[in-house]
Amino acid sequence: MAIARTARPTLTGALTAGIAYGSLAFTGFRGFRQFGEFGGIGMVLCWILTYSYGPALIVFWERLRPPRPRERASSGRPRSIVRAAAWLLGARRGAFGFVAVALVLAIWRLAPLIRDPFEYDFSKLRNQESRTHGVGDLYVRVGRIFPQDLAPVGVALVPVPSDAPAYARALLAKDCADGLSRAGDPRSRDLQSLTRECARRVTAGEPTGGLLSAVATVYDYLPTEQVAKLAVIEDIRRLLSDRTIELSSPEERKQIEEWTPPLNLRVLALADLPEAIVRRFREVDGTVGRLALIFPIRVWANWDGHSLIRLSEVLKGVHLPNGAIVDAAGQPSLFAAMLRSIGHDGPIATGIAFAGVVLVVVILFRRFRIVVLLLSSLTLGILWMGGVGAAMGLKLNFLNFVVLPITLGIGVDYAVNIFARLEKEGPAGRARALVETGSAVALCSTTTIIGYSSLLISSNGALRSFGKLADIGEVACLLAALVVAPAVVYRRSPPAPRARSLPTDAAGL
């Protein structure tokens, strides 16, 4: 009887949660896909093992230790809870008033966030201990002393080593053009004038006005224009070897000998560079010269998502004079890809999760009224979650955006169990049914909240935001189910049981 009456509500919860996790498998980011695949499979397997292995385990345990008959508690506390549940069942107007006011407040707080839902302040997603200990301020103070960051912000791999110097000039020129355009420089209106000005600044080594300070290649450590310089040195050597030098005094000839360039001067190659320099630009296969290290200016908004996206666009698609196109990889490219993944994959995953939840609820319950009530309760909980999150200053980032599809799958489970139990009971037994089923549902939600809350002790801001938003979603969906279900159930006795009747929850058995 327990298995028969609880299979459908719990199967609904397992399937909707599995679909919610599985919706992440349709995202383009590999980490989210694997997260969704493991979560979706785990939800379904847990339900299968519960209903196959669980009963056998219970019977086996009762053979070892036979259960004692339980007596219903006679203290005043259960009666007070039942009276509170009865009051909740009778206070339909108050419940609907509370729902309406809370919904308006949630939409009011959520509306501005819809226009800009993503978190671009990455300092909130990093290690929060570094913020509290003043490391961020120290970073800015040091940046005023050193004009260039000590670590590269990106790395490029050019087709052949000889392309590295041209790539460095092209990237700095592109960064300069981007900086002047964003600053509103008058030259930015004329592409040719902008190109000439940026080329001049790069050649003269002047500040470009962009986010990059230098592009280091192994050729930076070799002398420039070596052939022309050797020609000048050869002219010096020829002049100093003129026969008229013999007319000079011994002191003058000694000084001339010191000025005479040595005969072993030659064009220096990469093989002549010290190992301490070469190892920074050597690939695994031993190739030297194709790597270009990209350095930003020392003080820049590396915590600002907008700046990271801007820099990622600069590092992408640099055109070389020979027609080759080179992309660079680095921190800006990674974070920009994550933000683009959220913007593209987030709505897809959420839409798939919601469609899957609707499909499962319709297939398992079929009755239009019950389907509408279940989805209304779920939607209300999601809107409350968004409103409270907006009030707390939470925005979507590359980690917590998965909370939305997951909450869609898990949150509907609470309304499913409460609605199913109350629809099965008559008016006289609904108060106790609400207490019994509500307590079981609250227990399930509490265990989930405890799991999410473990993320709140993390020093990583992104993990904390995941735990906060997930906890808010759990409480909101549970509260919506406990308030909406008693307010909308029939006051009259339910109709006579049909062949396909709604199941009751396990907690009421």
Image (cartoon, rainbow, N blue to C red):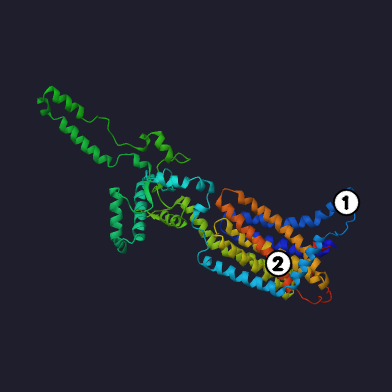
User: Which residue is at the front of the view, 470 or 368?
Assistant: 470
The nearer-to-camera label among 2 and 1 is: 2
User: Which residue is at the front of the view, 480 or 296?
Assistant: 480
User: Which residue is at the front of the view, 281 or 267?
Assistant: 281
Is residue 288 shown left or right of residue 490?
A: left
Question: Which tag, 2 or 1, sits closer to the chain's start?
Answer: 1
**Which residue is the extreme one toward the front?**
76
Amino acid on which the number 1 mark rests in the picture: Glu
Residue tagged by mark 1?
62
Q: Residue at x 70, y 67 (%)?
A: 481
Residue 414's spot in the image, x, y percent?
72, 64
Residue 343's spot in the image, x, y percent?
53, 62
Which dot marks residue 481?
Answer: 2
Quadrant housing residue 82: bottom right
Mark 2 and mark 1: span between their CA atoms?
Answer: 34 Å
Secondary structure category for the residue under label 1: helix
Residue 136's spot in the image, x, y percent?
46, 47
Residue 405's spot in the image, x, y percent?
62, 62
Q: Quadrant for the N terminus, please.
A: bottom right
Amino acid on which the number 2 mark rests in the picture: Ala
**Which residue is the extreme one toward the top?**
250
Secondary structure category for the residue under label 2: helix
